[in-house]
Image (cartoon, rainbow, N blue to C red):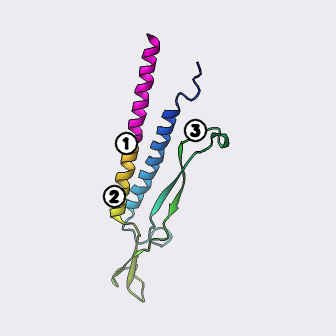
Amino acid sequence: MNLNGIFKGMTLSGSGMAAEAARLDVIARNIANANVVANADGEPYRRQDVIFETVMDEALDRDAVKGEVRVVKTETDFETPLKEVYDPSHPLADPKTGIVRYSNVNMAFEMVDLMSASRAYEANLKALGAYRDMLRQALRLLEA
């Protein structure tokens, strides 16, 4: 009996859960920094997003399973403009214009993204549980 690949379903669900966990971490960081005017380099915080990839060919990566999801990188959003507020009394306001630049994090978008990542994580968890139950049932059938 060939047991190669018997745990591929668990690997796929686990990779999806790990990817969504990374996405949840980045979303939490975005929410935590939504009102940051200046970080360590003096610039407002910019929203970040996680980029995933799917393994399409196992021959290219011996440790991977076809269909597995991985986090490729975390990308900073430079396309969305920073929020600008006129507040000449703010200590970080531009001395000429009186404008303060805030983070480009949109809380509504982040909350929708948070719900999406949370539900994707739950779906992978349920798939993992179903796969575990199928393996358990297969073992029971082999015992008989």
Instruction: Give me the residue at 37% from left, 42% from top.
Output: 122
Going from N to C along the chain, the mark reached first, 1 or 2, is: 2
Where residue 20 sits in the image (x, y, percent)? Answer: 44, 48
- Magenta stretch? 123-144
Do tag 1 and tag 2 residues touch (Cβ < 8 Å)? no
Give the residue pinned by disc 2: 111
Residue nearest the viewer, comparing 77 with 68: 68
Query: Dot 2 lies on which element?
Result: helix
Against 32, residue 121 (above or below) is above
Query: Label 2 crowding class (10 Å Cα cut-off): few <14, some 14-19, many 20+?
Result: some
Q: Quadrant of the N terminus?
A: top right
Task: Tell me the distance, in whole angstroms, between the alpha carbons under discs 1 and 3.
Answer: 21 Å
Task: Tell me the distance, in whole angstroms, between the alpha carbons under discs 2 and 3.
Answer: 32 Å
Q: Amino acid at mark 2?
A: Met
Query: Dot 1 lies on which element?
Result: helix
Q: Amino acid at mark 3?
A: Val
Against 25, residue 4 (above or below) is above
Q: Main secondary structure of the magenta part?
A: helix
Query: Dot 3 lies on which element?
Result: loop
Where residue 4 sits in the image (x, y, percent)? Answer: 59, 27
Quadrant of the rendered structure where residue 121 is?
top left
Residue nearest the viewer, comparing 24 with 3: 3
Task: Tell me the distance, in whole angstroms, between the alpha carbons under discs 1 and 2.
Answer: 16 Å
Instruction: Give me the residue at 33% from left, 83% from top.
Output: 89
Where residue 68 sits in the image (x, y, percent)? Answer: 54, 42
Give the residue pinned by disc 3: 65
